[in-house]
Structure formats: structure tokens, C-alpha cells
Image: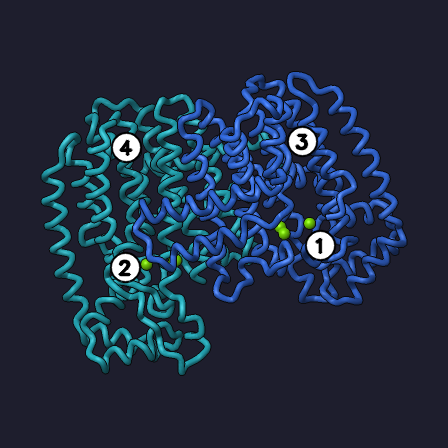
Chain colours: A blue, B cyan
Amino acid sequence: MSDVETFAKVFDDIAKEIIADFKANEDLPPEALEWIDRMMRYTVPGGKMNRGRTVLATLQAIKGKDNISEAEAKRANILGWCVEWLQAFFLVADDIMDGSVTRRGQPCWYKNEDVGLIAINDSLFLEGLLYTILKKHFRSDEYYVDLVELFLSITLKTELGQLLDLSCEWGNHEIKTNPEKEGDFTRFTMERYRRIVLYKTAYYSFYLPIALGMIMGGIKDDAVFKQAKDICLEMGEYFQIQDDYLDCYGTPEQIGKVGTDIQDFKCGWLAIKCLEKASPEQRAIMAKHYGRDTPEQIQKIKDLYVELDLAAEFTKLEKDSYESLKKKIAGVQGMPAEAFESLLAKIYKREK
Amino acid sequence: MSDVETFAKVFDDIAKEIIADFKANEDLPPEALEWIDRMMRYTVPGGKMNRGRTVLATLQAIKGKDNISEAEAKRANILGWCVEWLQAFFLVADDIMDGSVTRRGQPCWYKNEDVGLIAINDSLFLEGLLYTILKKHFRSDEYYVDLVELFLSITLKTELGQLLDLSCEWGNHEIKTNPEKEGDFTRFTMERYRRIVLYKTAYYSFYLPIALGMIMGGIKDDAVFKQAKDICLEMGEYFQIQDDYLDCYGTPEQIGKVGTDIQDFKCGWLAIKCLEKASPEQRAIMAKHYGRDTPEQIQKIKDLYVELDLAAEFTKLEKDSYESLKKKIAGVQGMPAEAFESLLAKIYKREK
Ligand SMILES: [Mg+2]
Ligand SMILES: [Mg+2]
Ligand SMILES: [Mg+2]
Ligand SMILES: [Mg+2]
Ligand SMILES: [Mg+2]
Ligand SMILES: [Mg+2]
């Protein structure tokens, strides 16, 4: 089995275990158990699983591949699935808040006819299951509290990021219903963008899985965690800029969904870069057409992005980020740089 | 200051501390801090605070009022506010899922014009804050992990309860839009009702605050926790039946909201009792009119409840529950019975 297959298989084990434990310990009717099973299998797997697989990769970099027993590798993969679980909890809720339609090539969970707003409880429930998994497999480890606290604190960071993200759109309520209303871009600054990305994406996508591998690998020096955080957060920023770029320039086959950042008045990298470079006339086009639903208006924004050659800006930034990260990684101390190298290799010039 | 005032004051301290810590440790713009402050103050206080005040009351029963320092009493009240925080997290989400309009005499949080579905993230964020409070005040206590695990496990129970509650309505999607559609009461049984109530209400409202007081009070014997759980869950069932009764028979002034259980096709005690006692003709009235929005149809259900004298059924049950609980409490071992007595006194024959 390839590493990906081994990792994917662990999900099935965890899901079966959860249902079996509920059957044994709780008094639930069969349709509730079926719902939980269906909901987990719909929402948790199906992504690229880079986040989840990073835990074992980090542990391997630290201890050496040959020094890790099969049981230990499985436990690292279980922690990896906890990261995927955390993400599923966020995504189910995020899709409702954003009014998204598709996710990973299928309808968003809440979009299923018999789900709707029950998905809010399902999202909370996914989060709850994460701590059930942690407890079952790590309760007797000396670092159990560290794991729980790490998940809890990263969750709070991500929720702060969502708040910052959502608040970017304040003052733009009427934009969909009132064609005369001009978009307010007061909060569309690179500084604010960096902050949103840091909180909303970088902590849970990059720092969390690396830190979990480090905890399992026995690293205790706070300075080494700080160094890892520094690299991971920069990687997360680069990753989110890619995400914003692909939302507009990636095909639905590539990204598993139809991008809607323009319609959604998202405070994304393209919009901010566009406003930075725009003439007063071009800025007026943004104010009039950004955040609207008609194909003509969406096209006007896309044309403007082409006019300002934002694709070239992105290519330049991609190169600069890569070099900056390479340099930082080369200076890593107290743990093998390999953990970061393989993660960077996975995301550099990604197309999905 | 009365006990209630002392307790209420602690909320303000916690809220200020949260904002101050965010200012010191996170890089957040002022409008985000304002949002968090406003959101906490809108959603967390304002209830009867029985749950929150039970923690200190339990500790007092165990250790004796005079043996508790002011600092210790404050810490118990902080734990009490964690219970209220947990409830706020549930209620904000629950109101969205149920499409509720008012809560505690004011519009539901999500009903505020500038909130809407951002309330989903706010609900998650409230949960996250709870663990921040716990960490800040209890991180160095030997029972810190027990506190965290108790909150996490009770959260999962409550989410299971929500799932059971929501799934009661399955098969009844079209009921609002299709007047021909008859209500399906397959899942309206006392057995299922008991299960919903246990998971959805009793664990977090009754067992949680008592168990927190017991942990702080140094009780370690599992059997004593089991005994407390047994009493608390029975109290919780009685409490929810009152809640269902008041939803129909309480005035909006009493209950701080307009009851909507009939319109919402809730699997509540009145509906189940009604179906138990109904003749085939009366059952047909339920099938045709339960779960609909028109005042005429709501009245038809209320008339049916009067016809079947469900108020008398409730009075009888209230008396029986009280006696059964009194007996159980009298037999309490390993801790003072007082903790349970004062809680029962607070809810018996309550009108709000
Ligand atoms: Mg989204
Ligand atoms: Mg979003
Ligand atoms: Mg995106
Ligand atoms: Mg409700
Ligand atoms: Mg509800
Ligand atoms: Mg009610």
C-alpha cells in the first residue's frame, strides 16, 4: 500500500470504531447511528489529505522512518485524521455561512435535501468526535493535555480568522440587492489580509499537523516550536494566496468547486492586489461590479484582473515566497529540516 | 451583595479579562474586539443563571459555607459561568436551526440585522472562549484535565441530543408547504422523548454544574458521581417536561419568548401525551394540524390539549417526580444531600 492508501484506510478504522463505541456505550436509535456514519463519511474524507498526512511525515523526519513501529505510525495517522476532522468541522459550517454550493466535487453537506440547517449541529458534532478520538487513543500519553490544548487553541485561532474574514464584508450588506450601492473596500488591505490568512488558514493547516508530529516526536523545546510556527505561518500565507488565485483561475475540475470569491465580495489576494494597482477608473469598476452575481459583472472583474496582469504578479510572488521559505528552512535547528521541505514541495506550484 | 448579584458580577470580570487578553496577545482590529465584546454580552448573561450558580452551591454544600475563601468562591463562580457559556454556545446555534425569533425577552442573536449566519461562527467562538477561561483559571490545578474532559464529553452528549431531537421531525419536511400532508408521529414515543431529554438537556443543565462543584470539592469516588448523575438526569427530565408544558401554557412574560413547539412539530411531552390519550378522531386532528403556522390550526391543537386535560396529567406528573426525587435525595451517600435539595427547590413548580 502507498502512504496515501495507508492513511486513507485509517479513516475507515476510526469511523467504524466510533459507531461501535456509540453502539456499546450510548442508547441511540439505529437511524441516528446511520446519520452519524453517513455524515462522517460524507464530510471528513475526500480532500487532498495533505494536512493529515503531514503528522506522520513530520514524525518520520524526526525519528527516522525505520525507527517507527507500525503501531506508532498508525497513531500518527490517527492524529492526522484529527486534523482532517477539525477541518471538516470548519468546512461544514463555513459552507453554510458562505452560502457555498459545492465542495470537493460534490454538493456541500448542508445542500443535501434532508440536511439543511441540521448541518450546524453536524459541524459541532464533528468537533466533538475529534476529542472522542483523541481521548480513546491518547488518554494515557504524558502529552495528552498538550494535544487537547493544541487543538483547542488552534480552533479558537481559526474562529478568530473567520470573524476577521466575515467582518471584511461589513458595510456591504445591500450589495446584492441594490445595484446602485458601491462596494466599500475600506478593509481590503494587504495588512488585514495577512492577518485573516494567518488566523483562518495557516494555524490549522500548517502549524497544527507539524506541531502534532513534533509533540509525538518528543520535541519539548519551546524555541523549536516557535521556529516551526514561523515557517508554517509563512507557508500558510503562500498557500492561501494560491487558493485565492485558483478560485479565479483554476478550473472546477482542478479545485473541486466553482469559485465564488468575486460574487462573495471576498477580501482575497486578487482583489487587494487589483485595488493596489488600479487607476481611479479601474477602482470604479471594482466598486460597481465586485460582489455581484451576474455573469457580465463577474466577467468585468476578470477582465480587469487580466488588464492589470495579476497573473504575472502571482507568478512573481510565488517565486519570492518559495525562495524565502527555502532560506528559512535551510536554517532550521533542533529538528530535521526535511519535515518542512516535503510540505513545501507538496504545495509549491500546486494546481489544486 | 446577594448571591445572584455576586454571581452576575463575575461575568463582567470574565468578559473584561477576555478582551484585555486578546488585546495583549492577539493582533486584532478594534472592530473585531468590539464584536466579541458585544456578542458575549448579548448571548451569555440574561438567563435565570440557575445552572451557573449551582457550582458554588454544590461546593458550599460539600465544604460548608464558612470554609470557602472568597477566592475559591470566585473560582467556583467562574466555573459556573463556563456552564452558562456552554449553554450560550448551544442556544445561539439552536435558535438558528429552529428558526426561533426571541430568546430571553430579546431577539435571538442571529436575528440582529448585522449578524445573520455570522452567528454560526459566533456560536463556535463562544465554545472556544469557554476553554480559554478554563485554561486561564484552572491550568495549574490537578483536576484541570478532568474539567476539560467533563466539558468535552457533556458537549458531545448534548450534540447527540440535538441530533435525536432534530431527527424526530424527519419525514415531515413538507408539512409547512403542503396542507394535504399528514404529520408522521412514528418517532413520538415516551421512550424516545426520555432519551432526547437526557442527552439534550439533563447532562449539561443538571449533571454538569453539580459534577463541577463535586470536582472542586475534592470528591473522587466514581460511585458518588454515578449517584449524582442518576439524580441529576431524573431532575433534568422533570425540568424539560416543565419546559414543554410552559412553551404552551406559559405567558411570553413568564418564559421570555413566544412558544413555538406546536408550529415546529416538536416531539414534546404534550404532543406525546396527547397522542397516548387520543381517540382515532383526535389523532387525526393532530395529523392534520400539528406543525402548522396558522393561528386557527395552532388553536385546534391547544383545544385538543384542553379536551384531553393534559394540564391535569402534568400536575400529577409534577407531584410524582417531586416525590421520587425527594426519596432519592434522602438516600444520598458520600456527599451532603443539600446540594440536590436546593436545586430541586429551585425548579419545583417553577413558572419560568
Ligand atoms: Mg468558504
Ligand atoms: Mg468563509
Ligand atoms: Mg478560497
Ligand atoms: Mg430551540
Ligand atoms: Mg432545537
Ligand atoms: Mg422548549
Task: Please say if the residues under marks 2 and 1 sit with CB atoms less than 8 Å apart.
Answer: no
* Disc 1 residue lies near ligand 3 with CB under 8 A: yes
Kind of residue at disc 3? Cys
Task: Please say if the residues under marks 2 and 3 sit with CB atoms less than 8 Å apart.
Answer: no
Q: Secondary structure at mark 4?
A: helix
Nearer to us of marks 2 and 1 is 2
Name the residue tied to disc 1.
A261
Q: Position of residue B144 (x, y in %)?
A: 38, 27
Mark 2 to mark 3 CA distance (whole Å): 48 Å
Comes first in the chain, label 4 or label 2: 2
Mark 4 to mark 2 CA distance (whole Å): 28 Å
Kind of residue at disc 2? Tyr
Q: Is residue B207 left or right of residue A102?
A: left
Please name the residue shown 71% across and 46% down the image: A187
Task: Please say if the residues under marks 3 and 4 sit with CB atoms less than 8 Å apart.
Answer: no
Q: Is residue B67 left or right of residue A343?
A: left
Picture disc at residue B193: 2
Name the residue tied to disc 4.
B213
Comes first in the chain, label 1 or label 3: 3
Nearer to us of marks 4 and 2 is 2
Residue B42 appears in the picture as rendered: no
Q: Quadrant of residue B308?
A: bottom left
Kind of residue at disc 1? Asp
Q: Are marks 3 and 4 on the same chain?
A: no
Q: Secondary structure at mark 2?
A: helix
Q: Position of residue B50 (x, y in %)?
A: 29, 44
Q: Are marks 1 and 3 on the same chain?
A: yes
Q: Secondary structure at mark 1?
A: loop
Name the residue tied to disc 3.
A232
Nearer to us of marks 1 and 3 is 3
Please name the residue shown 57% across and 22% down the image: A67
Kind of residue at disc 4? Gly
